[in-house]
Image (tube, rainbow, N blue to C red):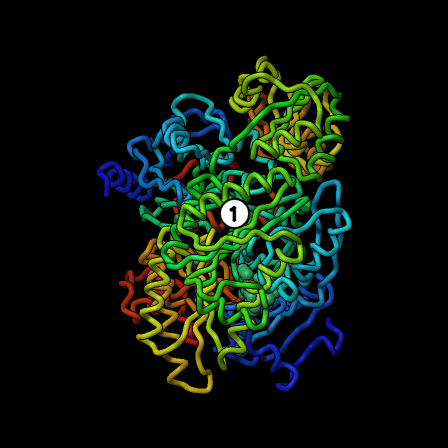
Amino acid sequence: MAASLESLLDLVRAAAAARTPLRIRGGGTKDFYGNTPSGEILDTRGLQGIVAYEPSELFVTANAGTSLRELEAVLTERGQMLPFEPPHFGDSATVGGCVAAGLAGPRRASFGATHGGVRDFVLGARLLDGRGQLLSFGGTVIKNVAGYDVARVLAGSLGVLGVIVEVSLKVLPRPLAETTLRFELDQAAALVRLNEWGGRPLPISASAWCGGELFLRLSGAPAAVAAARDILGGTEIVGDGPWTEIREQRHVFFSGDPPLWRISVPSTADVVGFGNQQMIEWGGALRWLRSAHPAAEIRAKAQTLGGHATLFRGGDRSQGVFTPLSPALKAIHRRLKAEFDPAGIFNPGRMYAEP
Amino acid sequence: MLRSECLLTDAEDTRPYDCDGLTLYRQLPMVVALPETTAQVAAVLKLCHELRIPVVPRGAGTGLSGGALPHATGVLLSLAKLNRIIAIDARARIATVEPGVRNLAISEAAAQHRLYYAPDPSSQIACTIGGNVAENAGGVHCLKYGLTLHNVLRIRGLTMEGEAVEFGSHALDAPGLDLLPLVVGSEGMLAVVTEVTVKLVPTPQLARCVMASFDRVEDAGNAVATLVAAGIIPAGLEMLDQAASRLVEPHARAGYDLDAAAVLLCESDGTPAEVEEEIFRISEILRSARATRIQVSSSEAERLRFWAGRKNAFPAAGRAAPAYYCMDGTIPRKHLGGMLKAIQAMEQKYGLRCPNVFHAGDGNLHPLILFDDGDPDSVARAVAFGVEILEESVRLGGTITGEHGVGVEKIDQMCSQFGGPTLEAFFGVKRAFDPSGLLNPGKVVPTLHRCAELGGMAVHAGTLKFADLPRF
Ligand SMILES: Cc1cc2nc3c(=O)[nH]c(=O)nc-3n(C[C@H](O)[C@H](O)[C@H](O)COP(=O)(O)OP(=O)(O)OC[C@H]3O[C@@H](n4cnc5c(N)ncnc54)[C@H](O)[C@@H]3O)c2cc1C
């Protein structure tokens, strides 16, 4: 066991005994996400390095504090990628933080092998629980139904169940060909088109609508990309398109003051409303909104549309940034938290005010 | 609560429910309940919870690990009558169905929209979506299109208390912890699934299949790893060893090369141009990986014929011996060849034949141990043979079950795959969903006492919260 892991175990055991809250942190690039963190910082960056990477087995295992950028560079060298195209939100992003935040990028809503969010590509994890024990879930093979699939629940868990110390992720080959098309459409028309295209076997790997422009990325075999480009029309963009800017929220849409809402809805949901400062991703399933409207109204609208709204950046965060849970789910959450973290030391309040 | 014909109590009526697809284990339930509505399911659960009666959910009973094995003093809760397709939304590309709907029925209903449900277990004409969710079922197309988990958007269920609960959503995510992956693959132990929304995907314009022969099983195994390393994710990638080809050929007439040590089936789907390009690359790679014969399907009929052999492996095994025992370990692809060699040695050791079919692209093995279920010695050898395969899978860095579940069958092997604290955490998950422990008790997770008895693990003093569970 690495000395750094050993010292984390001691730290967690001591914190559990004293009931000292711990704030789990990698590179701190997602400090803004979720409710305001509190507690003594537990830094995961001592847990360094890729543990195993076998391109032909399509998996990589890395310690939680490994730099996300370095990991992606190693995959790129072998012509592979993290299929969920995670946002980094800064140079110091770590693999553990990426999984704990559970945020996926533009490729989230594409089809075939490349579809899915972070949890869909988690194969296994080692977790340091609130008793200071190391637990090991899942593994490195693609198919594995031995025991409950706790490793995948860690994706988006925001550290409330424990410290992710190591994670195994499924990786995929980079597409052989990729291109981006641009269309001029209003929001309603873009939604109609996106859903219509989604029902056809087209190699769409990302979509984004903003301010009257719709961008579409095609990825796959050269013949498939070429054929789809001919079917779809639009204007082909030279270069990589806006995808990195959008993923990293450096696109001009994300600048300025109004609170940023992340609204997750069925792809066929109507236009959300609340003004025209909106960006649509994921074939219609993700709506970004800049709006100072009351949180209750925005949440209610998201719910009517069959989804939920998260106050992603800015705004009044005092009422909690996530949509509250149903009583039945809340009860399961509370009991699960108590099983993994009986002293309630990990990231208190980061997801919900009560455990 | 239930119509009288929906409650079975006589042994002659409950007998058909005494086992699932794994017939090695049998047990008559106290009663069989066949509710027709979700409200009835909830009422049954509430009553059982109040009276402290164990409940075992069941779909079509095709499971291969004894997950739906009844409890002697419990209610066997069949969801088979909840078999309505509630809605197919072609625009949103989703289908919402009751748990008793058969897997294939979803694709049949979606076909008019040129859509289908991708996960295709070989048992798809019979197994239910509720059972698929409970086992995280896989199929031939999972390498490219994902497992059940990757194709389910929302699950509505009932807790053991009969309370309604919803996991996931028709959006791509839901607030809070993502509990959907816990419920998928939970083998009926966390909640009773009453409604499932699945994703539908556009039917590919074209699919073609490459059939390749190999003189050595190691070469076939290496060919699989080489294909994947070259960046190809085929729509399907399956393998049969010679014993399996010879077993199925007389019935399926698939045209398999019976002199080959192994046959590989590799499918490509997409647009005609895309398929042509991919088939070319696949053929090149297979040739350089020492394939001795390569044949590409030239029509849909021929493609289906190639697959007919693979899909008939289980029935053929059933005809070749009084009984067969299907194993389900998953290993890293690079060990496929070595594993086949190891299984051949075990055939000698246990004096039993074992043809092999693999979901090769996923590294998921299905060795079919042929034995005589009327001969206790043969049964004992078959079980020991199976255990050795599973332990070898774990040793190679894999898992004891890729898609069939732990159930009662592999509960002891859980001790070799997981450490004590992790097993305790599994019990913690179970308690969080079902504090009463009445839902499908005694399956999947072995108690630490049990592991200690098997010599697999040390018991952590004083940490055991669950009472010891009976051995099956
Ligand atoms: C010939 C044959 C081929 C097969 N091929 C494959 C294959 O290719 N891939 C594969 O993955 N599997 C395969 N299987 C195994 C089996 O078909 C799958 O595990 C299937 O998902 C089981 O579905 P079922 O409806 O029969 O479930 P059952 O056997 O009735 O139950 C399975 C488990 O699910 C639970 N359960 C059932 N319904 C519910 C519900 N509504 N709510 C909660 N829990 C529930 C039960 O308690 C049990 O633990 C095969 C089986 C056979 C016999």
Work out whether A85 lies above or below B460: above
Q: Is residue B384 left or right of residue A350?
A: left
Q: Quadrant of the N terminus of chain A?
A: top left
| Residue toward you, B240 or A89 | B240
Location of residue A68 in the rendering, given as x and y in whole percent from the top left corner: 40, 29
Location of residue B1 in the rendering, given as x and y in whole percent from the top left corner: 73, 71
Work out whether B153 lies above or below B220: above
Q: Residue at x 74, y 78 (%)?
A: B5
| Residue toward you, B52 or B275 | B275
Q: Chain of mark 1?
A: A
Q: Residue at x 33, y 71 (%)?
A: B346
Label 1's element?
Answer: helix
| Residue toward you, A105 or B239 | B239
Q: Which residue is mark 1?
A: A333
Asked if residue A97 shows in the view, the reply is yes
Location of residue A44 in the rendering, given as x and y in whole percent from the top left corner: 33, 33
Q: Residue at x 75, y 45 (%)?
A: B89
Work out whether A94 lies above or below B82: above
Q: Residue at x 45, y 37 (%)?
A: A99
| Residue toward you, B388 or B77 | B388
Tell me which amino acid carries mark 1: His
